[in-house]
Amino acid sequence: MSKEFKRFLVTAALPYANGPKHIGHLAGAYIPSDVYVRYMRSIGKDVVFVCGSDEHGTAIPNQALKENTTPKAIIDKYDAQIKDCFHQLGMSFDIYHRTSEPIHHETSQEIFLNLFNKGLLTEEISEQYYDDQANVFLADRYIIGTCPKCANPNAYGDQCERCGSTLSPRELINPKSTLTGNAPILKSTKHWYLPLQNYEGWLTDWILKSHKDDWKVNVYGQCKSWIDAGLQPRAMTRDLDWGIKVPLPDAEGKVLYVWFDAPIGYISATRALFKELEENKLQFATPQRDFKNPKSNDWKPYWQDGDTKLIHFVGKDNIVFHCIIFPIILKAAGEYILPENVPANEFMNLEGDKMSTSRGWSIEMHEYLADFPDKPDVLRYALLTNLPETKDSEFTWKDFQAKNNNELVAIFGNFVNRALVLTQKYFDNKIPSRCALSEIDQKVINDMKELPDKIGASIQAYRFREATAQVMDLARLGNKYLAETEPWKLAKTDLEKVGTILNISLQIAANLSIVVEPFLPFTAQKLRAMLNFQQLDWSKAGAADLLNAEHSLGVASLLFEKIEDDVIEKQIKKLLDSKKAMELASQPVTPSKAEITFDDFSKMDIRVGTILSAERVEKSKKLLKLQVDTGIDKRTVMSGIAEHFSPEQLVGKQVTILVNLAPRKIMGVESQGMILMAEDKDGKLRLLQPNESVSPGSTVS
């Protein structure tokens, strides 16, 4: 028999504040956790829901280098962006915290000292990679090389983003420093290690025996693979100047390993929540939350009482840290509860390829919201119906369009709109009374009553795709009921029966406003306004008397709007253009040619000329015949630019021309100079022109 818990603590993976986050992240941890939390609150459970920005680790200073700024500027920029996106997408966190806050540094250092003082950390001197040009030890993400498992040439020292394998720097083939590009050397340094191997027996009992039947197969399988392969000691400190300082006197220049401090962020976020509640300073609390007389120490039962159920929602690449390393830290600390479940999802791919911001193959949250500001729920629905719950899934823009047009618009929205419009037409926008029920009426009521329990059971089993489909089944039930009873036809002969049909239809709509709230919160709010109906908890779902006769409805409007083909084509083009731009940006610049002297350069006479005429050359795809006013004279120049410019584009343009190049015949025409061009990485030619008009013959020096 499963245990009844007094309270629930739900965490969503802390996103790195080193750049925008894409919709694959939403599908991995955030949308599923929000659905779960909203449902659990609706059934009356005591739930605390925490998240926040992960602001340490090498990813932050790496991004600062790319953007030519400071790590602090990076975390401030992306914390604000990510937090705003989550807010716009309806995430109902009780707090969205930051690991740069003092309370997090304090909490992480306390736990580290707890382990150190118990003698549970080992001090070791080992050889680690060092960049002797930059004069720094290289933490995991300052090293790239070839992945030993999938041959990805750009794998990091801690993880390969192509295959998802967890790595150590010494496993990389041909490692290089990301700071200088040099091959690193090995140099001795001191660190404090957590001997993971000492906990193998305990992990075997806790995961492989106790959670074999209730953890998802993908999570259990990854954990078993790690344990079966044998765990190794893992350093809990790094040589870095960005992060939480190691609280020991002989640890100058060392910080806590980001995967030591990051999950502790859940604890510090919970501490911060109750501290801010006590001080009435909370910034991110959801309006429906009501903590009674909160005190700063009220965080402790959520982390230190066995009657609390702790659940981590994460993505595939975070499984090992949340199922093995963090639980070992909690176990070693001795004061904390352990996660009851880690319902991690696999990866969501995009249009046939793995999602990756660095390759330009992603849909960033902030870009989606900019392009579809009124459709946060459409994205939530498209992701929920396609979550990578036990294996990788795929998002496509065409499927997104189909989910919106064929399901949200044609089924859900169509049903609600018809029920409301018909009530407005025949009953002055008031709920009609019911007369005697027919067999079909009673069956619909019975089916409606059963669905909320099915939806709830699926949510509690972390089967969110199934639960979302069941919500849509309720809308389908209403649509089918209207289609079969055809009240618009019946109105001519039996208005009383029409009243019964519309009453039942509107009861279905009221039930939809309850059960859809965890999934599509903005839609639920809009639907309640149209029904002129207050928010009810889950215990009321399934009832056929939520709306009383003569209850006045609100103003009917469309719940969802159709998305046209041109909108989707624009998004696909945007995606392809982004990928192409990233590929070009990553291509190496053409190496410089052999050194020349100033005397060599001074021999070239480069002038500004004006193109007087241009024409194509017969039997040539590349050549244009140009007449150029060089200021010295008017001369003919043959130029191989016909694939990049039409003759009409060039007439009247000013160009730079090498005027003292020896003439030579091309296609029987003597060319008397060379037009200078810039060739981009994509091979496209561009004119080199003065930034404002100058006299022909002006020299370039």
Image (spheres, grey):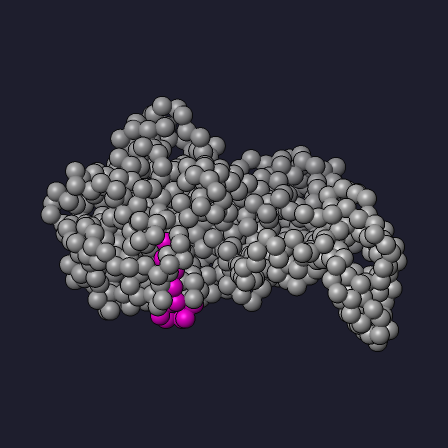
Q: Nearer the viewer, residue 640 or 256?
A: 640
Residue at image position (69%, 61%) is 684
Where residue 488 sits: x, y (%)?
A: 77, 51
* Quadrant occupied by the N terminus: bottom left
Res 182 quadrant in image: bottom left
552 in relation to 129, above or below:
above
Q: Is residue 156 visible?
A: no
Q: Is residue 291 magenta?
A: no
Q: Is residue 95 visible?
A: yes
Where residue 375 sits: x, y (%)?
A: 62, 46
Left or right of 573? Residue 520 is: left
Q: Nearer the viewer, residue 548 or 186?
A: 186
Residue at image position (70%, 40%) is 556
Residue at image position (39%, 52%) is 179
The residue furthest bottom is 619
Residue at image position (38%, 38%) is 98
Left or right of 616? Residue 432 is: left
Where residue 220 sits: x, y (%)?
A: 32, 64
63 in relation to 532, above or below:
below
The residue furthest top is 279
User: Which region shows up in magenta?
Assistant: 142-152
The residue furthest front is 599
Left or right of 115? Residue 516 is: right
Left or right of 93? Residue 241 is: left
Q: Nearer the viewer, residue 605 or 533?
A: 605
Where residue 70 sits: x, y (%)?
A: 43, 39
Res 423 quadrant in image: top right
